[in-house]
Structure formats: C-alpha cells, structure tokens
Amino acid sequence: MSACKKDTDQPPTSPAPQANFAIDGQESASVTLKSTWDYYLENKSQNAESFTWTLGDGTTSTKKHEIFKFNKPGNYTISLAAKSSSGETSVAKKQVKIVATVLRNITIQNIDWRAGDGALPKSNNADVWVEITKREEGVNYPLTKMGAYDAPVVYRSPVYYNATPDNVPITFKVSEKSYIDETAVAGSKYDVQIHAKDAQGTYLLLHKNLGSYSSVFNGKINKDTNGFLWNVGFSRYSVDLTGNYE
C-alpha cells in the first residue's frame, strides 16, 4: 500500500533572482562619469539565467556583461533585468550623470630649437605661448604669414617669458570659459599652435590639428592616461606636447 502524498508537499522552488550590477567597480545607486569613455558594466546578479540591459539612450543588450559609453552629457538611467529559470524577474537601476570631458591643461614637455636655423628663435631663450583655434566646417580660412589657419582663437595661454630648452616642462591651465571638449577635439575642429618670440622676431614653432593628437588613442581620449600625447621631431628642432582632460 503506497503512502499518501501530503497536500502540503510542494515541488522545490527556485530561489528568487536578485539583479545587481557595478559600473567600473562602482555599486552605488548614482554615479558621475565622463563622456566618450568606455565603461564596464559588471553583472553581479544572483539566481538568474537571462539578462536584459537598458542603457538609457535607447540601447538594449542581452549580454551578461556589457561595455557602454555616452557621447553626450546628460542624465541617464541604466537598468538590468535578471530573469530566473522559473520566469521570475528582478530589476536593478542606477542613475548616471555624464559630464563633458574638457581640456584643462596643456604642457610643453620638450621644445628644443638650438640646432635650428631659418624661421626659429636665434637666441637660447624666447617668450613662448600656446593658442588653440577653432575652424567651422564649410569655412575657407586663409593662412597667416606663418602658415597657420587664420581662425578664431578660443584659447590663448599666458606668455611664458624667457623660456629655454632646459626649463621645460611648461604647463598652461585652460580656463573654464575656453570650453574644449573631447568630442570636438576628436572631430578635428581645433588646431593648436606654439608661438615663440625673441628680439629678432616672432615664430610659429608648431601648428597641428588637435584631433591628430587624440588619434594616438584611436580618435578618443585614453581613460588611463586621461589626456593626449603628441611627439614631433624635425631635422631642425623637436617638440613634445601633452594635454590633460578633466
């Protein structure tokens, strides 16, 4: 005679899913991040078999972990729905504030014109400054006498007087009003110039598109170094320039 099954006997149930995730190691409910950088979404959910990310900009994903970035500053909500084998769903959300990655410092790491000739300072010391100009698309800018585009100046550093090849590095702080964000830099809208002046005249030591510096890091700012790096060596002289973003 078989034993009667009790009415209270129930099939084993799966534990309820618990959705949870971290953004680049941060598990707080709200985080502030930089625009245009890649961030790692680490799925830390429990008791779940399938997942759906909603990244706040219209993007969704069903990967367990995800990498994301926002190109535009603003406020976003990232959510993760974790679903168990029994069909139960748990949702975790985080508020993300994206702020612009803005150029804050430019440093002349090396500048050596001592082996030069022609249109270069004739003495060992010269007054040095940096300018950044912005070119708008579709506008044909004329060239100055020194070969740079005659575009509006959006940043001009203070003059560093009596600079020599031996007293580098020279760092200039970019002011708040000179809003030069990384997205525009990578889009090649800006040109950087290094000027020098001595008793004999004024010289253009460097004129390059600022986006070419960022291209060292595949067209965007490198999050680990937090800036750009550019080196140039001419037969007549050499220049090393770096920039830092905040």
Image (spheres, rainbow, N blue to C red):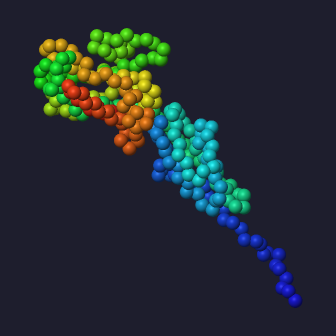
Residue 112 versus residue 30 in the image, above or below: above
Point out the image quarter for the C terminus: top left
Locate residue 213, reporting x and y percent. 36, 31
Count of numbered tags: 0
* Furthest-front residue in this view: 235
Query: Can the viewer see residue 151?
Result: yes
Locate residue 177, reporting x and y percent. 38, 23
* Furthest-left residue in this view: 123
**Residue placed most toward the observer, 91 or 127:** 127
At 52% across and 37% down in the image, what residue appears?
Answer: 70
Locate residue 233, reporting x and y percent. 25, 30
* Furthest-bottom residue in this view: 1
**Residue placed most toward the observer, 89 or 180:** 180
- Name which quarter of the figure residue 125 lies in: top left
Point out the image quarter for the N terminus: bottom right
At 40% across and 37% down in the image, what residue appears?
Answer: 217
Locate residue 140, reporting x and y percent. 43, 11
At 37% across and 10% down in the image, what residue appears?
Answer: 142
At 38% across and 29% down in the image, what residue appears?
Answer: 212
Is 29 left or right of 51, judged from the image as shown? left
Is 156 left or right of 95, judged from the image as shown? left
Residue 86 versus residue 58 in the image, above or below: below
- Name which quarter of the figure residue 198 lies in: top left
Residue 55 versus residue 231 in the image, above or below: below
- Name which quarter of the figure residue 219 lies in: top left
